[in-house]
Image (tube, helix red, strand yellow):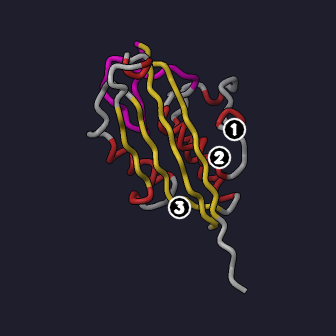
Amino acid sequence: MKERHNMRIGQSIDIHQLVEGRKLILGGVEIPYEKGLKGHSDADVLLHAIIECIIGAMGLGDIGKHFPDTDPRYKGISSMILLEECYRLMKENHYKVGNIDAIIMTEQPKMAPYIPLMRKNVANVLHCDESQINIKATRGEKMGFVGRGEGIVSQSVCLLEDE
């Protein structure tokens, strides 16, 4: 009898407001900019979307269930630590990353110089090859809250495979 190969997909979107007085951190990379993202943790919108799509693929709810913004333990925490915890959940449930495809939607700043390090950060924490992690960016073309520079959106899709 042929061995069954289980694959699961997950998707997520995360949105955070840009505000003064905060660091801009995306994919675990601090990006020089006059504003940062508002949130309970470091508000890394990219990692939040990636974490939540993995949690969703496993059928384990959402990011708020695992890392509630009402819990003081997560106040100001690096989302890289949350991604490490997400990896632990994957291992517990016997999954590994097939691939992740994510997009960052922001008018400013330009993301291209930072994407290689973001990919490396995510791949290192999830113990996969960088070729399994794709991150891209687009602008709001001056339309909507993204185009006006009021916030950043990130979407992510993942494929998980049996370990």
Q: Is residue 17 left or right of residue 54?
A: left
| Secondary structure that dominates the magenta span | loop
Q: Residues within 10 Å of mark 2 (few under 14, many from 20)?
A: many
- Residue identifier under label 3: 98
First of labels 1, 3 by sequence position:
1
Q: Is residue 5 left or right of residue 142?
A: right
Residue 139, horizontal then vertical, whole percent: 34, 29
Q: Looking at this rendering, what residue extends furthest in the bottom direction?
A: 1
Going by the numbered disc 1, the residue's amino acid type is His
- Residue identifier under label 1: 66
Going by the numbered disc 3, the residue's amino acid type is Gly
Going by the numbered disc 2, the residue's amino acid type is Ile
Residue 103, horizontal then vertical, whole percent: 43, 40
Q: Look at the numbered disc 3 and give the secondary structure of its residue.
A: strand
Q: Quadrant of the N terminus?
A: bottom right
First of labels 3, 2 by sequence position:
2
Mark 2 and mark 1: Cα distance apart in space: 9 Å
Q: Look at the numbered disc 1 and give the secondary structure of its residue.
A: helix
- Residue 120 tag number: none
Q: Which residues are magenta?
A: 20-40
